[in-house]
Image (spheres, helix red, strand yellow):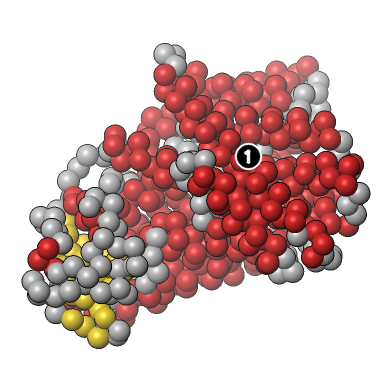
């Protein structure tokens, strides 16, 4: 339903937010859980096939890989926006940069991600789960006749439900949407997002159990005498995160330059997975089991170095091909390997107790994720929820802060920002949507509009400042109204200018 969002209708949004959150949480949770279940089954099927290295089985496996690669090729041709993790696409949808066809996305992402998972590509389930959940949110908004503004809230709720179901991490699901998608915290977004995330987590726990995503935890907190290692580990994983980002973007650039048939580009990682299945199987798949094995197995220094380099290159090789799959889980795996490697080095030369291996694995997972996506709070909470251990908050914060500073000092942009910007420039779907939509933005201390009069802000055309909420009171915008820190601005524009308006009010276009 096309509608103009007035100030009066804006005040009534909260009457439907709870219902929207419940519906999206149930529907988005169902499809994300189904995707996770299918991936688990296909991973087991692949392992059974690879356990029988017989001539006929090897030939059959080769044929299956060729067919899977062709299936992914046709699906990407059918729906280009289903490529990769899907997180930049959801961000672009919320910014109004382009328009996802939710039914086509749902079909292509679910099936394509399943084929990639079956082949053993080093890709994760979290990105596809987020895009699947967001697509379900958009479908629900259409079926429930929601306006464009409410549609974005339901897409956000679906994305939160997807991450929550993928990792049994409801708080992280909410924080991901607020910190990564909207880069702001508003109750009108928080309510449906939180409800959907909790419902999706409840449904997931009924299927996969109450245990956290990883079946290990810290038995002893890291002693204060070890805390200087947090600084060194933060530098180490921060640098590896930067290397990962640059390598991933480098592989993407090389794939785009390669003058071969698109099917060959997609087939390449499938063939590589086939070879690794009979030579170095540890690199296959997202790597969930690998993280747990690192805790229980005493690996050599050379093996850990080979594993780190191989996993990094194979992940970038797979993702660069645009096959449906995410990088959250592979990045966490790289962090776990890095933590094990760091611990191994200092155990050989510094005499650290083996009791604390799990501590360093967990710390490195949060640190490298911070370096890659540049969201330290999300990284800390996600790792905490996935491991079920709260004994290491302080050390997690230290490692994450150091890793963040390393990535910033090396001028490495967050990976999702780097992936989104070329897509916005290309603007895959160039339609200009005229439905009006509303969003909120907060004036922070670093805002270029702070202490400016409204008439001097230079607000873009096709954009209207509806109201200003200041200390829980509504201020009617006038030309001489002075913008103050903490003001919540309610802005209306049409969907064709949403990206321009959001960029402007974030201060990026000033």
- Answer yes or no: is residue 123 visible: no
Provide residue 53's location: percent of width, then percent of height: 80, 23
Front residue of this view, candidates 123 and 176: 176
Identity of the residue drawn at 32% across and 79% down: 14
- Report the side of 478 relative to 172 (left or right): left
Residue under pointer 1:
240
Provide residue 108's location: percent of width, then percent of height: 44, 40
Instruction: From this view, report whether residue 317 is shown above or below residue 374.
Output: above
Give the number of marks: 1
Instruction: From this view, report whether residue 387 is shown above or below residue 490.
Output: above
Front residue of this view, candidates 60 and 357: 357
- Report the side of 366 relative to 136 (left or right): right
Instruction: From this view, report whether residue 489 is shown above or below residue 500.
Output: below
Image quadrant of residue 313?
Answer: top right
Q: Residues within 10 Å of mark 1 (few under 14, many from 20)?
A: many
Provide residue 406's location: percent of width, then percent of height: 57, 46
């Amino acid at each position: 339903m096309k509608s103009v969002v007035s100030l009066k209708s804006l005040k009534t949004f909260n009457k439907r937010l709870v219902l929207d959150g419940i519906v999206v949480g149930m529907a988005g949770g169902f499809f994300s859980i189904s995707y996770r279940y299918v991936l688990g089954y296909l991973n087991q099927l692949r392992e059974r096939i690879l356990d029988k290295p017989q001539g006929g089985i090897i030939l059959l496996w080769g044929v299956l890989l060729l067919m899977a690669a062709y299936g992914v090729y046709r699906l990407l041709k059918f729906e280009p926006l289903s490529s990769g993790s899907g997180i930049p696409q959801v961000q672009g949808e919320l910014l109004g940069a382009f328009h996802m066809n939710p039914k086509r996305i749902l079909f292509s992402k679910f099936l394509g991600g399943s084929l990639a998972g079956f082949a053993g590509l080093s890709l994760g389930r979290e990105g596809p789960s987020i895009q699947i959940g967001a697509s379900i949110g958009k479908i629900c908004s259409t079926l429930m006749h929601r306006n464009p503004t409410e549609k974005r809230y339901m897409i956000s709720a679906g994305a939160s439900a997807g991450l929550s179901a993928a990792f049994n991490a409801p708080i992280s699901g909410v924080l991901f949407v607020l910190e990564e998608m909207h880069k702001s915290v508003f109750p009108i977004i928080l309510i449906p997002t939180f409800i959907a995330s909790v419902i999706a987590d409840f449904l997931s726990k009924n299927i996969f159990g109450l245990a956290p995503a990883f079946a290990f935890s810290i038995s002893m907190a890291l002693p204060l005498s070890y805390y200087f290692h947090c600084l060194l580990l933060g530098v180490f994983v921060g640098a590896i995160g930067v290397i990962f980002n640059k390598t991933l973007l480098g592989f993407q650039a090389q794939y785009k330059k390669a003058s071969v048939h698109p099917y060959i580009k997609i087939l390449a990682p499938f063939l590589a997975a086939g070879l690794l299945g009979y030579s170095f199987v540890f690199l296959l798949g997202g790597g969930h089991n690998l993280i747990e094995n690192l805790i229980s197995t005493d690996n050599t220094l050379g093996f850990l170095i080979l594993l780190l380099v191989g996993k990094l290159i194979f992940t970038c090789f797979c993702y660069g091909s645009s096959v449906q799959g995410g990088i959250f889980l592979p990045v966490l795996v790289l962090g776990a390997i890095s933590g094990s490697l760091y611990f191994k080095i200092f155990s050989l030369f510094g005499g650290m107790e083996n009791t604390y291996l799990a501590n360093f694995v967990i710390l490195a997972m949060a640190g490298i994720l911070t370096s890659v996506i540049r969201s330290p709070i999300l990284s800390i909470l996600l790792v905490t929820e996935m491991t079920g251990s709260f004994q290491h908050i302080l050390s997690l914060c230290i490692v994450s802060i150091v890793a963040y500073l390393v990535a910033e000092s090396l001028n490495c942009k967050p990976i999702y920002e780097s992936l989104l910007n070329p897509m916005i420039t290309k603007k895959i779907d160039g339609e200009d949507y005229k439905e009006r939509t509303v969003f909120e933005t907060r004036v922070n201390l670093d805002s270029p509009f702070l202490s400016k009069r409204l008439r001097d802000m230079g607000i873009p055309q096709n954009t209207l400042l509806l109201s200003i909420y200041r200390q829980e009171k509504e201020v009617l915008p006038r030309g001489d109204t002075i913008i103050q820190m903490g003001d919540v601005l309610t802005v209306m524009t049409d969907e064709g200018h949403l990206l321009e308006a959001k960029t402007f009010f974030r201060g990026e276009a000033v």
